[in-house]
Image (cartoon, helix red, strand yellow):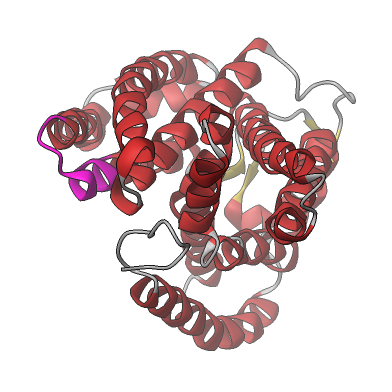
Amino acid sequence: MDYALVWAGLIAFAVLAYVVLDGFDLGVGILFPWARTEQERDLMMNSVAPVWDGNETWLVLGGGGLFAVFPLAYSIIMPALYAPIIIMLLALVFRGVAFEFRWKSQHRKYLWDWAFAGGSLVATFAQGIALGALVQGIQVSGRAYAGGWWDWLSPFSLLTGVALVVGYALLGSTWLMLKTEGSVEKRAKSSAFYLGVVMLGLIALVSLISPFLHEHFMQKWFAWPAMLIVAPVPVLVLVCAIALFRGIHRDRPLMSFLAVQGLFILSYIGLVISFFPYMVPSSVTLWQAAAPDNSLKFLLVGAVFLIPIILAYSAYAYWVFRGKVGPTHDYH
């Protein structure tokens, strides 16, 4: 068994699970400032309150797994991305405590409203910048990071940061369409249309730029016959785009929400296709970055038990809190 490849798949799955699950509740936070009344803000926050902390479990699993299983990749990537990752973690802390403090601090509630909204926006933007910096490449010398403190900041990483903010906001708007009623649902529906248009434009722009960043990216997407293998990805993106706008037009929020999730999954698949077999593009492959097989075997035993438990808990939480959020903070 190729344990390094198995673990690469598990970590890739954990990161994808984080994106598709935590993405919509970060999106709700990004959209939070356009709520017009206290009741609307309560409704928006309560739509994600039962599940947001469970969603972030996948971030811990992905980061911890990278440290334990691919220590060389971790030792290169972290110094290159310390700034955006620390900013992201601090923003998530402010956002997380806002869920609790907002209900108790009645006289300073507006401060925690901004902590929730600002934390969501900053965390998302930092994630997008970190992703863009990793995609554009990290300077490596031997087995260590050889770049500078500001290498993570570039026009491309800023573009991916904006793209992720728009994408999470789109996820959040379709989630609110699915979970709320009244004025919040109506504005979420209107926002979803415009955000969807912008999001598709950003996907196209990032997809056009990315292959020119590395030669092996170009070979995956524009060399014959490799083009035949990756051709289904853009075709399925078009299918999801059609489903998104059809769901909005026909008042089918579940269709719209799943279509946006499909766009994220397909974008992620495209990223995996571009990266493979590298953990650090053009520098370190996943086999070079992996820990010894004995360590991978030992850790895999724990993962076999842990991941199904997380999946079962997450599924149960979403099942218990299914349905629309009522005006009195309950579910019906």
Residue depicted at 56% across the width and 24% down the height? 160
Most frequent secondary structure within the magenta stretch: helix
Q: Is residue 283 left or right of residue 51?
A: right
The boundaries of the magenta stretch are: 249-259
Residue depicted at 29% across the width and 50% down the height? 178
Residue depicted at 29% across the width and 45% down the height? 257
Inspect this view and state whether residue 139 appears.
yes
Q: Position of residue 134 (x, y in %)?
A: 65, 33
Image quadrant where one finds the C terminus: bottom left
Q: Is residue 225 above or below residue 97?
A: above
Q: Is residue 297 above or below residue 230?
A: below
**Magenta stretch: residue 152 in it?**
no
Q: Position of residue 130 (x, y in %)?
A: 68, 34
Q: Is residue 208 left or right of residue 244?
A: right
Q: Position of residue 54 (x, y in %)?
A: 56, 68
Inspect this view and state whether residue 273 appears.
no
